[in-house]
Image: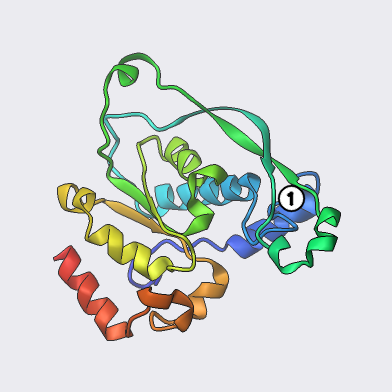
Amino acid sequence: STRAGAVAPDLDALFRNQIERNTAHPLFFKTDTHWTPMGAELAAVEMARQMRAQMPLPASSRPGTRLGDLRPMVLAAGDLTQHVPPAQRANFPSEQSLIRQILPPEGAAALIEDDSYDTVVVGTSNVQPRFGFQPVLSNQLVRPVGLAWRPNNMGAYFALLEYARSESFKRQKPRALVWNLLEQDMVNTTSNSAWGSSAMPAPEFINQLRRAVS
């Protein structure tokens, strides 16, 4: 992927280093398969840093998302607790993380409603709004960033194909696309049965994607 010009940060090394330096703010939930907002923020900051260094984008005429202080975010029930017998679920209470506050636009930006963007995040549930990856990336890149995500049981391949077929893609093809895949999904092919009705042979996926972006 790097030979093709893709930016692929080593998040494993980054996360391990952060865990060694700061144990107060977990990067993953204990009872859930997702990262915490603190993990999402760390990944977004590093992604933006490498994008700025390796694929500099022209300055945007519109600002990125304004961020404020950290505030508590509560995960009421982790998705792993469903595998625990009901009588034992009380042993796994809700978890808390910190998440960056999103501030309203300032000045002229507050008066303009514009959903256009030249950078977009595509992926599954790790990049859903409640974890805050997209706004931090927008803030760090100093530009609006779009978001297209689907539940992980549909898969990142389907999410990418669906976005490429969307009206927003046809209206403005992005200069940069950040494709988020969970580590365990990177070894699954497009035809894996885990994707259910979204599964398809790899040649079909490639052909459909080529048609969508042509």
The answer to whether residue 51 is left or right of residue 82 is left
Q: Position of residue 172 (x, y in %)?
A: 19, 47
Q: Residue furthest left?
A: 214
Q: Nearer the viewer, residue 77 or 102?
A: 77
Q: How is the image coloured?
A: rainbow
Characterize the local packing of mark 1: few (<14), some (14-19) or many (20 or more) Cα atoms within 10 angstroms: some
Q: Nearer the viewer, residue 21 or 93?
A: 93
- Rendered position, 79 above or below 3: above
Q: Amino acid at mark 1?
A: Pro
The answer to whether residue 185 is left or right of residue 77 is left
The answer to whether residue 206 is left or right of residue 73 is left
Q: Position of residue 203 (x, y in %)?
A: 27, 85
| Placement of the C terminus among the 4 image quadrants | bottom left
| Placement of the N terminus among the 4 image quadrants | bottom left
Q: Residue at x 84, y 62 (%)?
A: 87
Element type at mark 1:
loop
Q: Position of residue 111 (x, y in %)?
A: 29, 17
Q: Residue at x 25, y 31 (%)?
A: 114
Q: Position of residue 94 (x, y in %)?
A: 75, 47
- Rendered position, 58 above or below 14: above
Q: Residue at x 65, y 59 (%)?
A: 79
Q: Nearer the viewer, residue 33 or 25?
A: 33
- Rendered position, 175 above or below 194: above
Q: Residue at x 22, y 48 (%)?
A: 168
Q: Nearer the viewer, residue 8 or 39?
A: 39
Q: Which residue is mark 1?
A: 26
Tell how many labels.
1
Q: Residue furthest top?
A: 107
